[in-house]
């Protein structure tokens, strides 16, 4: 068979395949034009606008918006509003506050040792993080003071901002058997990898291979619809402050009412609750106080 004969066979096969899958790929009679729109058409109740491939494969934020529109419809599970759960029902309790010795009373040498633990690390350590909790040139005390000022300006406390995330973690553990495995786990892995390792592309494969087991749960929180996806990793990250706290899970929490989302690690929420530490300004895991408030828009100024 000559070259043109082979080409003819492949063309015919492609046409047959397209005809057979068009009902799946299309919605409203329009064939989807790219991967993310294809996923959305198969799972969403609406047809999203065609996406620009340059945005899909370029900036991570554009990819994140595309992914948010691709996940399945919200499931109305028989789970009462998270705001109505008591701490004992969730098997959760607030952590001791200000557990660490006041940093301002520490010597310069002690502060430097803590900062060294917080910075990116390429060796082997149970405490230190390859991506780092703090930028290479960032200083811990000015960072804590800046974030503390932001939180006070919002009229909130660090605990106000951390507790909703920690309660969601407890809820996910409570209903682990009702969580669904996300069909787009590979896409989420790529997203989180990109968000966290933008400055370290050489470590991409190593971090990607550490991710597994992505699942999500739908629930209400102060009458708002939320979806939380949890991504467990092969390994445990320990708190750099030596308090015995550890966690191995990343999350994506989305307020489905306003479309705002948080992407980060549950360990960061523990550090926010205990120390008001949101990670460095250039850290891929940083949770900005204002970003947290935009997702949990039911939070009101604290009277404490």
Image (spheres, helix red, strand yellow):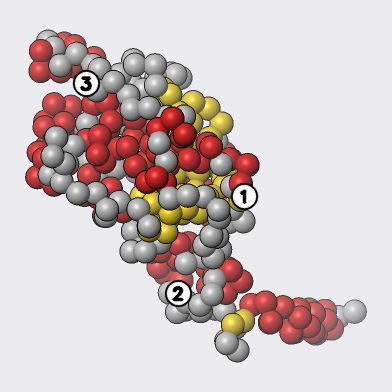
Q: Quadrant of the C terminus?
A: top left
Identify the image quadrant of residue 33.
Answer: bottom right
Graded by Cα atoms within 10 Å as few (under 14), some (14 to 19) or many (20 or more), the crowding at tag 3 reads few
Question: Which residue lies under the disc numbered 1?
Answer: 181
Where is residue 13 drawn, in percent x and y? 80, 80
Distance (Cα) linking label 1 and label 3? 37 Å
Distance (Cα) linking label 1 and label 2? 26 Å
Label of residue 63 in the image: none
Q: Is 177 left, or right, of 100 in this rendering?
A: right
- Disc 1 or 2, which lies upstream in sequence? 2
Q: Is 231 left, or right, of 196 in this rendering?
A: right
Q: Residue at x 25, y 34 (%)?
A: 159
Graded by Cα atoms within 10 Å as few (under 14), some (14 to 19) or many (20 or more), the crowding at tag 1 reads some
Label of residue 51 in the image: 2
Q: Quadrant of the N terminus?
A: bottom right
Q: Residue at x 22, y 31 (%)?
A: 276
Q: Is 268 left, or right, of 27 in this rendering?
A: left
Image: 67 above or below 111: below
Distance (Cα) linking label 3 and label 2? 47 Å
Question: Which residue lies under the disc numbered 3?
Answer: 98
Q: Is 243 left, or right, of 175 in this rendering?
A: left
Where is residue 135 drawn, in percent x and y? 25, 34
Nearest the camera: 292 or 64?
292
Residue farthest bottom in this picture: 29
Where is residue 76 drawn, in percent x and y? 53, 60
Secondary element at image label 1:
strand
Determine whether label 3 and label 2 are within 8 Å by CB.
no
Secondary element at image label 2:
loop
Nearest the camera: 181 or 227?
227
Q: Is residue 270 visible?
A: yes
Identify the image quadrant of residue 259.
Answer: bottom left
Image: 95 above or below 214: above
């Amino acid at each position: 068979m000559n070259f043109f004969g082979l080409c003819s066979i492949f063309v015919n096969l492609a046409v047959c395949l397209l005809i057979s899958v068009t009902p799946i790929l299309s919605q409203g009679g329009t064939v989807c034009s790219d991967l993310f729109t294809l996923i959305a058409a198969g799972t969403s109740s609406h047809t999203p606008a065609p996406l620009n491939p340059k945005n899909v494969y370029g900036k991570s934020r554009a990819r994140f918006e595309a992914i948010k529109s691709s996940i399945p419809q919200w499931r109305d599970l028989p789970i009462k509003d998270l705001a109505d759960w008591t701490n004992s029902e969730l098997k959760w309790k607030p952590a001791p506050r200000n557990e660490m010795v006041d940093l301002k009373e520490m010597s310069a040498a002690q502060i430097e040792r803590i900062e060294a633990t917080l910075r990116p690390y390429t060796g082997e350590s149970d405490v230190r993080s390859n991506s780092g909790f703090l930028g290479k040139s960032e200083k811990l005390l000015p960072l804590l003071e800046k974030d503390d000022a932001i939180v006070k300006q919002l009229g909130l406390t660090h605990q106000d901002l951390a507790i909703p995330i920690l309660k969601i973690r407890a809820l996910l553990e409570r209903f682990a058997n009702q969580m669904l495995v996300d069909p787009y786990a590979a896409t989420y892995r790529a997203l989180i990898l990109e968000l966290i390792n933008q400055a370290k592309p050489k470590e991409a494969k190593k971090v990607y291979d550490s991710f597994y087991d992505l699942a999500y749960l739908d629930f209400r929180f102060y009458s708002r619809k939320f979806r939380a996806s949890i991504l467990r990793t092969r390994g445990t990250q320990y708190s750099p402050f030596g308090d015995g706290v550890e966690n191995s899970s990343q999350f994506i929490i989305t307020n489905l009412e306003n479309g705002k989302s948080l992407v980060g690690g549950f360990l960061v929420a523990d550090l926010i609750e205990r120390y008001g530490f949101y990670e460095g300004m250039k850290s891929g895991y940083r949770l900005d106080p204002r970003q947290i408030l935009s997702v949990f828009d039911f939070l009101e100024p604290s009277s404490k």
